Amino acid sequence: TLKQAYQPLNEQTVVELAKKLELFTDYQHIEVHEIGDGNLNLVFRLIDSVTGKSIIVKQALPYAKVVGESWPLTLDRARIESHSLKKSAEFAPEHVPEVYYTDHHLALTVMEDLSSHVILRKGLIEGIQYPHLAHHIGTFIAKSLFYTSDLYLHPYEKKELVQTFINPELCKITEDLVFTDPFYDIDTNDFPSELQDAVSELWTDTELKKRAAALKYKFLTRAEALLHGDLHTGSIFVTETTTKIIDPEFAYYGPQGFDIAHFFANIALNYAAHSFHISDPLKRSDYQGYLLGVIKDTWETFSDQYRELWKKEGVEAATKLPGFEEEILSGLFTDMIGFAGCEVIRRTIGLAHVEDLESIGDFNGQIELKKRVLKLGSDWIKKAESIKNIDEFITYIRSV
Ligand code: ADP
Ligand code: MG
Ligand code: MG
Ligand code: MG
């Protein structure tokens, strides 16, 4: 390693770093751009305009980029992100960028340039269909959960991994912004006054708040498997044929239903938004049908592969008990529904919104749609126990 003290990089110093690390053979034609569109970090793309070789350097700042220095945030998230990417590469290398170099002091990761891909959220807003998406995400989540759990690992090894991924500051962001703030009158919330009545209804719904608190409690206490922790459609890079999961700085050991819930919730938000983005009714129903198919196929791929891994590679004694996998999967499914409910609510009235909804030009239409999204989230949270299968879960999205 370089043993260099932390300093935020810029377009000049990132080239000096590349030289020290001998990332290129020649530096005459290196072009650099800071391309980060995320909320938290710096992302540089370096390309040799002659050979075409390119790399990405992602560096954490000691604060959240979107807010500024008034919101300090641990640099340790860069360590978490690089460890997570490397862990995923052990069982699903085709679904993560390759890591070339990491430096915990500089809080950076040098990785494969995936600029041939687009961010899934953008593609979905444009109405593009990705035929392999569901299979890839279902596979990635099944492997991630199984291979990092006590079902497969020696309990010592698992606990060592739990330690590696202790991530208190990033978890706290989720605990506050996903599970607490949207359910209370707290100033991180962000919604137009036209939504005040609908929001007040949530804030006075004791049953809803209790269910959300129970979901938060699971997030706080259940070290079941290594999660990505922020698996929304902005953390997925796609082409027609490939799917790559990026940005795992929120990774930690948590409840198994969490990641798939965030994926489904963000697909549901995109579905809702297409009531406005696609005006032709046939095209709209075709695309919305595709989105529901993604949810169904992802769930089926996930659960089939999870059962398969359990049967073939399960080590823990519990994996030999007939039917126990169904108990685990059914608990995961119920948790998933509640977590998805929290995610759609916080993306509507919390601090971080989604472009899918915000880009709706018809303001009154956007408000009415957001009210229905809040109802969807509240239903999922409160009725999770009574929703029996993925088709019933999907039916709720249809009514949005
Ligand atoms: P943040 O943690 O700040 O959200 P991300 O990891 O999501 O950062 O990256 C922000 C943006 O930078 C992505 O949306 C993408 O446009 C670009 N980016 C990140 N990683 C890569 C990569 N490996 N290849 C190409 N572009 C990338
Ligand atoms: Mg991101
Ligand atoms: Mg981003
Ligand atoms: Mg991030």
Image (cartoon, rainbow, N blue to C red):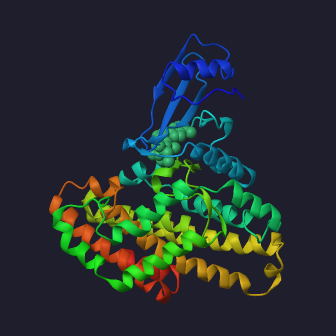
Q: Quadrant of residue 79?
A: top right
Q: How many marks?
A: 0
Q: Is residue 198 left or right of residue 327?
A: left
Quadrant of the snapshot with the N terminus? top right
Residue 87, image x and y in percent? 71, 51
Q: Nearer the viewer, residue 145 or 53?
A: 145
Vertical side of 204 occupied by 247: above or below = above
- Residue 238: in sight, yes or no? yes
Q: Nearer the viewer, residue 330 or 148?
A: 148
Residue 218, image x and y in percent? 56, 74
Residue at far bottom of view: 386
Q: Is residue 126 left or right of residue 312?
A: left
Q: Is residue 187 left or right of residue 86?
A: left
Q: Nearer the viewer, residue 248 or 77?
A: 77
Quadrant of the snapshot with the C terminus? bottom left
Q: Is residue 202 left or right of residue 329?
A: left
Q: Quadrant of residue 381?
A: bottom left
Q: Nearer the viewer, residue 292 or 11?
A: 11
Query: What residue is rendered at 32% in x and 58% in y?
Result: 188
Residue 317, image x and y in percent? 84, 79
Residue 228, image x and y in percent? 58, 57
Residue at far top of view: 28
- Residue 116: in sight, yes or no? no
Query: What residue is rendered at 45% in x and 42% in y?
Result: 63
Query: What residue is rendered at 19% in x and 69% in y?
Result: 196
Query: What residue is rendered at 65% in x and 48% in y?
Result: 85
Vertical side of 278 occupied by 82: above or below = above
